[in-house]
Image (spheres, rainbow, N blue to C red):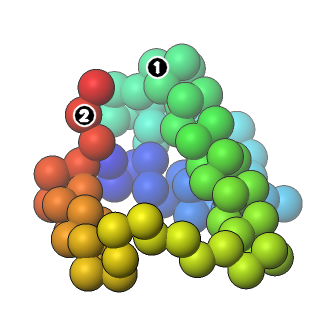
Amino acid sequence: MKAALEFLEKLTLRPDELVAADLEPLRAAGCSDEDIRHVTYVCYLFSIYDRMADTLGWRYYPYGDARYFVGAKFLLGRGYTI
């Protein structure tokens, strides 16, 4: 997870600095090329959604702010499962 997050930070904030060697920590942590692709796709989609939400002023929590933050806390503690 740490290697993936460090890679995604660079991909998001400094994409012009990415080099092939930036994939080595991911591979050393056991990530396959398919895993790396999936991590990159998720980052890409979240970046688009985030920019769209900011641009269009989206703020929609169907169950209210309190339940939204409970769900966010759950995901931070437990993560996503398949």
Quarter location, residue 14? bottom right
Crowd tier of the residue under label 2, counting other residues whose Cα lies within 10 Å: few below 14, some 14–19, many 20 or above: few
x, y percentage for residue 28? 38, 33
Q: Secondary structure at mark 1?
A: loop
C-alpha distance separating marks 2 and 1: 19 Å
Q: Residue sitting at 69 percent across and 47 percent down?
A: 44
Of 58 and 50, nearer the camera is 58
Of 70 and 30, nearer the camera is 70
Q: Secondary structure at mark 2?
A: loop
Q: Which residue is mark 2?
A: 81
Q: Is residue 77 left or right of residue 30?
A: left
Q: Which residue is mark 1?
A: 32
x, y percentage for residue 62? 43, 65
Amino acid marked by disc 1: Ser
x, y percentage for residue 7? 54, 53
x, y percentage for residue 10? 63, 62
Which comes sooner in the sequence, label 2 or label 1?
Answer: 1
Q: Residue sitting at 70 percent across and 38 percent down?
A: 20
